[in-house]
Structure formats: C-alpha cells, structure tokens
Amino acid sequence: MFRSSLNGRSVILGLSGGVDSAVAAILLKQAGADVRALHMTNWEDDDGYCTAADDLQDARRVCEQLDIPLHHVNFAREYRDRVFEYFLDEYRRGRTPNPDILCNREIKFGVFRQYAKRLGGELLATGHYARTAEIDGETALLKGADQNKDQSYFLHAVSETALAETVFPLGGLQKDEVRRIAREYGLAVHGKKDSTGICFIGERPFREFLKTYLPASPGRMLTPDGDDVGEHVGLMYYTLGQRQGLGIGGRRDAGDEPWYVVDKRIKENVLVVAQGEHDLLFSDGLDASDASWIGTPPAKLGNFRCTAKVRYRQPDQACTLKENADGLLHVEFDERQRAVTPGQFVVFYDGERCLGGAVIDRLHRSSMAGIDTVRDVGT
C-alpha cells in the first residue's frame, strides 16, 4: 500500500478516466495531498474508435465522487508533432515503433508536466505501476511490485529530474488490489477494461488506420532460399516474428509447420518468411542508438553486466553491454533472443532498478542463419 505522507503538498494527478489513476487519487488523498486532477486529450479524430470523450466523462464522474477539482487540457498538436510523426516515420523505414515510450517522455512527463507546474503543482502523480527511490544521491526508477503490470519498461526514457518530482501511488500494489479499492469506494470505473491500443489512439483495425497515412506497396514474399510463396500487402503491416495474417497457410508442399516473418528487405520490397523456429528468428545480440539513462550511465560501458528486455513483459535476459567505436550500444545476450525487432526498445536493469534503454537498430545473427552476422533489418 502507498504509505507516503504528503502533508498538504500540491499534487497534480494525471487522471485518464481509468481505474488505475482513479485509485491513485484515493491513495493521494489518504496520504494528505492537496490533489487536483488533470485530464488530457491527445487525439481528436472522430472515427468511432477513439474513446477520448468517454474517458473525459469517466474522469469527471471520478472527480465528483472524490471531490477533486478537474482540469482539462488538449495536447493533440503536440502529440502529432512529437509522437505520431515519429510513429509514421519509423513505419516508413520498415521498422516497428513503440510510441508509448515517446509519449511518456514527450507528453506525460514533458508538456503535461510543465502544464501541471503552471497550475501550481509541486509534484506530478500518475497511475503507472512503477516505483522510485533515492539511491546514492540519485532518483532511481524501480519495477512495480506487480510483475504482470510493471511499467518501468515504458518509463525508461523519462528524465531523472522528472522522476524526482513524480509520485507513483500504485507502485507497491497488485492490480487486483487496485480494483478492490475502486469497488470499496463505489467508483463506476472499478471494472473498466484496461486500454491496450496505441497510446491515446485506442484499439482499432491497424491496417486500415495506417493505410490512411501511409500508402501500401504490395510485393513478393520469399523464403530465405528465394522461393516465391505469395504476395504481401505492404511491408509496414508486418513485424519480425509475426505468424498471423500471412495468408500462406495450407500449402500442400510445405508441411504443417507455421510460417513466420523473419526479415524485411525494404529496398527490394520483399518480405522474407520461413517455417518453424528458423535460425533467422533468433539474434545473438543487437546494436542500439539514442540511449536514455536514468542517472549516471554505466561507467564507460565496457563489458557491463546487467539484464535487458527487448519487449514489454519479457523476463529479464542476462547480457553484456558495451559501447561500440561508432557510438552505438552493443548488447550481447547470454542466450539467443527470438524476434528482436528494430524500432522497438531494449531496456536495461540491475535487479529491480531500471537503468535506461535505447532504440534497437541492428541485429547480430549467427552465420548459420544464412545472412551477414551484423545486419540492419529493412535494407
């Protein structure tokens, strides 16, 4: 349970309209904070999928029940400029982005935090499942107590300065405890489904959505040996390791093993697919760029031992981290990793502490995979 004593300090809570931030409001009030809620709208297209209007109404009801003032701000322009354009550009490059991480850095802990300061907030609070602690004079980001909900992966690019001024009331709770508290307080959102779509855009048919912004370019699907097995509908719609939606099942000459995407050749507009657990699905290591560190970076990055995740909810993977001569981070895993994806993020940990992360650029695959040992996917 959240046990901090805030003693009348002014806290601006990011209130989404969901159960997590609603319970964060309850816990902040119990801790003695002077709580005000701030709800933001970041996507305005009225296409039947965005839930922004419903979320605002849910936020209003929560504030009425808890007697908390509610402010509303629109950051749709900032979201498009700082997050969505990046999202589209990564897909143009044949990569698979994670806009939620940029959204946290640029919007929730960027312009939103600055707006909260203008409202007079001493601290910012959110409903994230994460914790902070002071370690050796630095503000450290720690995993949330609920391993299934821990969101430190998505927060790794938030600055230490922002984290030092942030409160995470749910960091020590399990999700079922959060819903129980919401039920006990009679909050209508106690059973509201968690959002799983793209940050602020919501759940929607992805291909149709992307097609409205980027022109699709169909091309050939080839095996690693060069056999033509069909046509893809556009490389941007596929990601490494993908199994569903390939449209090549049931080939009589292919056997029963499932097909997977194992490579994307952007210049040739070719999607490479293979059956079963093909060597091309696995990487020994990776190179990453645009590193973000929370606090002091690992000293010189010379064969630094830590663990890493290449996707959300992946168990921590033991690895060695060092900096290449070209400035890229090189990560060598103790065990081969499946479906490492350029454009996604590799995030580093020392036990419970999140150290930071970087954008995956290049994969290192063993020579037995039949391609260069170091390769940019999407070339």
Image (cartoon, rainbow, N blue to C red):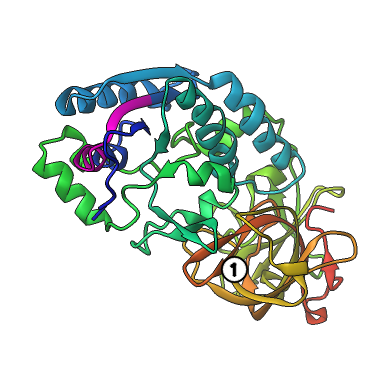
Boundaries of the magenta span: 26-38
- Residue linked to disc 1: 308
Does residue 28 show up magenta in the picture? yes
How far across and how far down the image is residue 23, in percent? 24, 41
Left or right for 230, reference 317 = right
Location of residue 80 (image quadrant)? top right
Q: Nearer the viewer, residue 164 or 227?
A: 164
Q: Residue furthest right?
A: 325
Residue type marked 1: Ala
Tell me the residue at 33%/27% (across/down): 37
Q: Which residue is drawn at the image coordinates 27% and 57% (left, top)?
A: 173
Q: Is residue 74 visible?
A: yes
Q: Does the magenta stretch include residue 322?
A: no
368 to the left or right of 192: right
Quarter of the rendering containing residue 369: bottom right
Percent coordinates x, y for residue 289 in the rendering: 76, 54
What residue lies at 74% left-to-right and 46% top-to-bottom? 94
